[in-house]
Image (cartoon, rainbow, N blue to C red):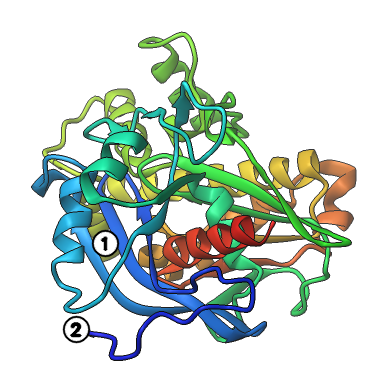
Amino acid sequence: MSAIARPPAVDATGAATQPFIAADVGGTHVRIGLVRPGGDAARPVEVLSYRKYACAAFAGLAEIIEDFLGTLEGVRVDAGAIASAGYLLNNSDDDGDGTLITVNLPWPVSLKDIRERLGFREFRLVNDFEAVAHAAAHMDASEVLRLTGPETSPRGPTLVVGPGTGLGAAVWIPAAHGAVVLATEAGQAALTVGNDLEMALLKQMLSQRTHVPVEHALSGPGLMNLHNALCTLRGITHDYASPGDITAAALSGRDAHARDSLAVFCGLLGGTVGDMALLYGVQSIYLAGGILPQIREFLLQSSFVERFLNKGVMREALERIPVKLVEHGQLGVIGAAHWFLARRQA
C-alpha cells in the first residue's frame, strides 16, 4: 500500500488514532509494519503496510525505519513501538531514553537517538515475546496447527514460546480488566537433558563453557551448536555455514547426522516446553515464530510430544494442555501494536 487517502482520525478525547509503526526486531531480520487501530474487538489492529528487512544490510535500526517510512507516500507517522529481546538501560519507563542491550542484535539501539532522528513524539520498547503473547490471544484456528492436547484452548494462563535467533517465552494471564503478560528470560535458564545422547552433547558443550543456557541449543544458532557437538562426538566434520543449511540437509534426507541433530533439537524442545508448562502453571501453549514453521512436518513426526508429556505423574495434567504452532508471519508486529495500544489506553 503506497498511501492512505484519509487524514488521521481523532477520538472523542482528542487523542490521535493515526497510523503508527510497529516492528519486530530480531537478530537476523526486522519485520516492520504500518498499523492502526481496527474497528472492533475481533480485529483490534489493522496492518496497512508490511516489510521484512535483513539486519546485516543496514547500519542500524533507525536506517531500517527510515527506509520503511520512505515507502509510505503521503502518510504522516510520529509514533511507534518495537518488540525486541534484551534489557533497556538507564530507563525509568518503556518510553525512556535508554539503550537496549542484547546479545542477538548486530548493532546497539538507542530509543532517544531514534526518536530524535525520526522526529517521533513517542517511541516505546516491549520485550519480543511479551509482544507475541499479546498477539497470540487473537490468533484464530486458521492460523494454528495443533500438536497435542484438546482442540479448544481454555481461557487461562497461556505460554508463548519459540526458538529464533535466541529463545523467547512469555505468559499471557487473563485478568478482570484485560490481561497481564509476564515477560521471561527462560532462554537463559540451564538446559535440561533427558537421554544418554543429550547428556553426551551437554557434556561436550560444557567443556567449552560453564553454563549452557536453553537457547544455546534451542535457537537457530543453537541448532548449529548441537550439530557441532554431535559431529565432535562422532569424529566427523561438516561444512554447513548456517542453521538453515543443517535444516535443509536434514529435511532432504541427504545427511543422517543433520537429521539426528534436528531430531535432538525437537526432543529437547518438547522436554523444555513441558518443564515450562509445569513451572508457569499454564493451561495452553503456543509455539511461535523462528524456524518451527519451516520444520512443521518434521516436528509432527519427532519426539516433541512424547518428551513434552514425559513428566512422570504430571503426564495426565499435560495431556489436557493444547499445544499449537502459530503460523502467522506478522505475529511480532501485531503483538507490538496490541501492546502499544493497550499502553495508550492505560
Point out residue 25 in the picture as x, y percentages from the top left corner.
34, 49
Q: Nearer the viewer, residue 155 or 333?
A: 333
* Residue pictured at 27% horizontal, 35% vertical: 113
User: In the image, is residue 15 above or below residue 74?
Assistant: above
Residue 125: tell me if it is visible: yes
Task: Answer few, some or many: residues within 10 Å of disc 2's Cα (few below 14, many 20 plus, some between 14 and 19).
Answer: few
* Residue pictured at 49% horizontal, 14% vertical: 211
Q: Which residue is mark 2?
A: 2
* Residue pictured at 60% horizontal, 59% vertical: 344
Residue 119 numbered mark, or none: none
Q: Nearer the viewer, residue 48 or 196?
A: 48
Task: Answer few, some or many: residues within 10 Å of disc 1's Cα (few below 14, many 20 plus, some between 14 and 19).
Answer: few
With 243 as the anchor, is 122 left or right in this view?
right
Give the amino acid type for the residue marked by disc 2 in the picture: Ser
Q: Nearer the viewer, residue 342 or 12?
A: 12
Point out residue 292 in the picture as x, y percentages from the top left corner.
43, 60
> What count of labels does the image hold?
2
Which label's residue is closer to the chain start, 2 or 1?
2
Residue 253 numbered mark, or none: 1
Point out residue 200 in the picture as x, y percentages from the top left corner.
47, 23
User: In the image, is residue 40 above or below residue 178?
Assistant: below
With 33 as the anchor, is 265 left or right in this view?
right
**SS at mark 2?**
loop
User: In the image, is residue 60 above or below residue 234?
Assistant: below
Snapshot quadrant of residue 313: top right
User: In the image, is residue 95 above or below residue 32?
Assistant: above
Q: What distance separates the C-alpha of mark 2 from that of mark 1?
A: 43 Å
Snapshot quadrant of residue 329: bottom left
Discs 2, 1 touching: Cβ within 8 Å: no
* Residue pictured at 22% horizontal, 34% vertical: 106
